[in-house]
Amino acid sequence: MCGIIGYIGSRNAVPILINGLKRLEYRGYDSAGISFLKNNKIGVRRCAGKIKDLELYIKKEKIVSHVGIGHTRWATHGKPTESNAHPHRAGGIVVVHNGIIENYFELKEGMKKKGQVFTSDTDTEVICHLILTYTQKGYDLEKATKEALKHVEGAYAIGVMNEFEPDKILAVKNDSPLVLGLGKGEHFIASDIPAFLKYTRDVIILENGDMATLTTEGISIFNLKKSKTVKQKVEKISWTPTMAEKGGYKHFMLKEIFEQPRAIADTIRGRFSLEKGTVNLKEFSLRESMLKKLNKIFLVACGTSWHAAMVGKYIIEDMVRVPCEVDIASEFRYRQPIVPRGSLMIVITQSGETADTLAAQREAKRLGAKVLSICNVVGSTSAREADGVFYTHSGPEIGVASTKAFTTQLTALYLFSIALAKAKEKLGAKEIKALFHELLLLPEKVEKALQCDDAVKKIARKYHRAQDFLYLGRGINYPIALEGALKLKEISYIHAEGYPAGEMKHGPIALIDHNLPVLALAPDDNVLEKILSNMEEVKSRGGKLIAVAHEGSSKVRSRVSNVLSMPETNYYLTPIIFSIPLHLLAYYIAVLRKCNVDQPRNLAKSVTVE
Ligand code: AGP
């Protein structure tokens, strides 16, 4: 997610913009820039790289201005370069933007045909040109922006300035966060409160459709959806700046767990058409003709991403009947794999820089496979070297333990599988529409799943002193048992194992005693009866049983006192819902054990060495 800051007042805007962007650095970014008004002329200074590079770049100029906007870019469209950095400009209009414009390609092509010249690969630049078009009709900035945004589909939080109206900044919010800071004779916009908390604690949280006009005299807000002026509540923020970076959450990991509804919504946004029943393959450089001929898929990754790869196998083989081979990357690269020509290798990597995954990706290419990277970092090595990239728009993941990246990887695999099923005519239009409908409901179902928070805290209090933990799952949820165990291991340092429940009799059952908490994943699927009997095995040997089940699952509730109830969804999306309580359980146990949740010992966010 990008960082936005804007200032209008009597102080010099430039240091305020730079300091504000520095407070947003924790969000991760790849380029930065500011725009300012001086002697009624717009200035723009941008660079790829870090804010300190931008500071060096502008230092000599000693710019003094009283109104400006700034931006740190987390690339979603277009590589991290100076030309793609924000603010973007068209004529006297400059814009900073956080979000995704779904229809930017069509808008851009239409405006290019009318002679508009674009200088970047970004979706954002179309907003500048649209607003400029309307100001050239004589509209003021508010009206021009209002008319321009009628053409725009997607999520956006924008800051806008017009060289010919130097006494104001405009801020518009639609599905991406945007807040206002109220000072004395000065006002701020930002994508997140930390950016201006040093200057004011009086904040307005904008709502969807709000278009705020900021001047030194005050702020007025017009809601474009309600077509009327609105008065939003001013809130007093009591957080420390460090707390503010985490959005009031104690750790980045908890913030990222609760960001998942938005992360999943952003990952599916603009990626499929419910009406046409199609996945928009162009963005991933995939063609239906290539998918149609596909007879073998390799899924390769490390750690949590490997768990996503395992779920991908279950989805693809069940939905499409194309054989899939899943490997841990460090194994794939050394096992002399047999990769039939025309195979597809799907690498899954949050960072795009994991050494073993990159090596496996290169080995697959050397053997003649096409490579699709499911990746969260634009311009990362995996993304650059792949034949196609499916970017998970989860935003920067700061916590070492991967959560929102994992569930957006699963979301990407679900969409890919539907595209493959369509190409191979395995699913009809009605079935595809049903799968899309369930996908559209997913963000709110994840929101609902997150309501188990208090119940999970109680279980964490009961079992945080355990020496060992066992996680059991079957079928598509077996990888989720592994994921739950990995999360607990990596942040609480408790020894935990995930196992296919059917394996109990082949060894793990010897572990069961009254000291061992056993968490069983028990969705209402074709193997529920089997997992119920595994749960009986655990209970009869005194194991401490915890279950994750679909709400209203009376069969599970009648057997277990600690049941975490999850909203119903289809077979393929259950792993996403069922991972929510497991991530929360690991988090709360780690907090009770006073572990360093965001930076666990011995671990790095990206393992760039073998
Ligand atoms: C996830 O919680 C772990 N931190 C780790 O297993 C991670 O998933 C693994 O290192 C792979 O990272 P990647 O997705 O960036 O390639």
Image (spheres, helix red, strand yellow):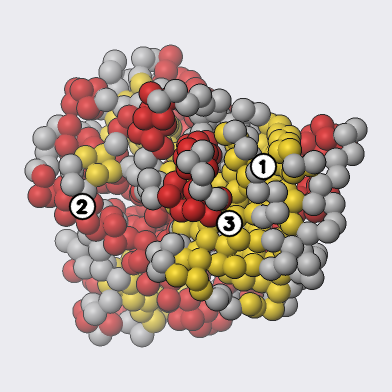
Q: Nearer the viewer, residue 168 or 462?
A: 168
Q: What residue does disc 2 label? A: 435
Looking at the image, residue 506 sits to the left or right of residue 30; the answer is: left
Amino acid marked by disc 1: Glu
User: Does residue 512 lie above or below 398 as drawn?
Assistant: below
Q: Nearer the viewer, residue 126 or 71?
A: 126
Please state the horizontal and vertical placement of residue 552, each as a whole percent of the image: 24, 80
Disc 3 and disc 2 in contact, CB within 8 angstroms: no
Q: Nearer the viewer, mark 1 or mark 3?
A: 1
Q: Nearer the viewer, mark 3 or mark 2?
A: 3
Q: Earlier in the sequence, mark 1 or mark 3?
A: 1
Q: Residues within 10 Å of mark 3 (few under 14, many from 20)?
A: many
In which quarter of the view is residue 530 placed? bottom left
Q: State how far apart marks 3 and 2 are (Cα).
A: 36 Å
Q: What residue does disc 1 label? A: 163
In which quarter of the view is residue 200 placed? bottom right
Looking at the image, residue 462 sits to the left or right of residue 563; the answer is: right
Number of dots carrying numbers = 3
Q: What residue does disc 3 label? A: 171
Residue depicted at 67% across the width and 37% down the height: 31
User: Does residue 491 lie above or below 554 as drawn?
Assistant: above
Question: What element does badge 1 sit on?
Answer: loop
